[in-house]
Image: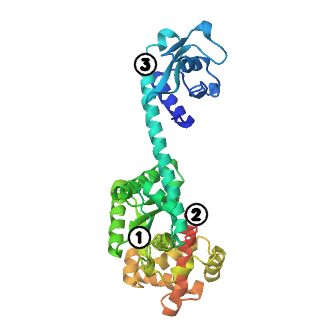
Amino acid sequence: MYISKIAAQAIVEEIGEEIHEHINMMDATGVIIASTNSARIGQMHEGARRIIQEGLPELYISGDMETETTRRGINLPLVVRGEILGVVGITGEKERVMGYGKIVRRMTEIMVTDSIQKDKKRYDQRVRYRFIEEWIEKSSAGFYSRNLIDRGRHLGIDIERPYRVMVLYFRDYHKLSDTLEGQKLLEEMEASIRHEMERCGFPYLREPPRQICLIPKCSDAQMKKTAEKLSGMIRQKYDRDVAAGFDSGQGSGEDIAQGCAEAFRAASHAVTWKEPFYYYDDLNIELFINEISEAAMLEYLDKLFGRDSGDRLGDYMHLIEQYFAYEGAVGKMAESLFMHKNTLQYKLKKLAEVTGKDIRRPSDAVVYYMALAFYQKLHMERTHFPDMAK
């Protein structure tokens, strides 16, 4: 066991604020690894070294014992599970700091124990994630080594069992990840989904910004039911939305890599078109959108709307999105956009004048559908997600 420097610094700062004294924490060799006086970090604390080497229950450094690296104050060993992990020290005059000693030591031991347990959980989770990544990578080979199978069983994962793949994305991921509060919210939501998956005994991999959930082979209806449960949980607890994509489920369930590729594409479509869920088997032209370069998409939009469309492009796309959302029903579109039917018809006419294509003609509608798909892909995914086809 050991105390991480980051955790140690957080602990001394928290305790220092409570008792309004300088606090130092030394590791098992006597080196100061955390302090409310940053200048002392990295120094050897002779008092702490004596406590460790001589097994002293405590040591007060008086004025005549002070050195350049050891100040007057009380120092006590930190004992966790019968092992001395380090020493905690409170700088100050004897009559002022002696009363704090045992309380501070106990507080520190409790916080150190909690930190070690959290570090172990994080380490175990990283080990599990690395294994699942390796499993997915090797699944395309069609067979697993005995070593990989045994490692999986040790982690409670039966890789010989057939699975389906569900990929989840939190909507507004990019906006949330731009702020500290948003990042904390993302971590909480990810933890909620991980805990639910682990409770069900399903393998789970956090691969920001997406989350990969492996479900024992089941029907499409059961996949959707699982996604609805996770989505409802996130909506209820955090008032946020989740998009989910499902693999085809047509294979043996052993090629997890192929299932991931399918679920990535389905999830990308769900995010792009604001669908709650989407199945790989329902994808059509979306199958090849990921193969088109961003440069080609931009060129397509520039050619259709003009290179100087600027801010107007967003307005055009909102109009196009509504057109397809309501299957060209002008009355419903007008109601959704809070405008008169005649005003809407005028806007559609102006759009046709700009592009030379009338969205109301079936032969031209596909041009706009592709434009919207490219726009959504560029503006909703480019800064959010890695390559969905990898």
Q: Earlier in the sequence, mark 1 or mark 3?
A: 3
Q: Position of residue 381 (x, y in %)?
A: 54, 67
Q: Which mark is residue 162?
A: 1
Q: Residues within 10 Å of mark 1 (few under 14, many from 20)?
A: some
- Spatial CA span between label 1 and label 3: 56 Å
Q: Which mark is residue 383?
A: 2
- The picture places residue 249, in percent across and down from the top left corner, at 41, 76
Circle 3 residues within 10 Å: few <14, some 14–19, many ≥20: some
Q: Which of disc 2 and disc 3 is earlier in sequence?
A: 3
Residue 43, percent from left and from top: 65, 24
Quadrant position of the C terminus in the picture: bottom right
Residue 337 quadrant:
bottom left
Q: Residue at x 54, y 67 (%)?
A: 138
The answer to whether 164 is drawn above or below residue 31 in the figure is below
Residue 96 against residue 25 in the figure, above or below? above
- Given this view, does label 1 or label 3 mark the residue nearer the observer? 1
How many numbered circles are shown?
3
* Residue type at the position of mark 2: Thr
Could you tell me which secondary element the residue under label 3 belongs to? helix
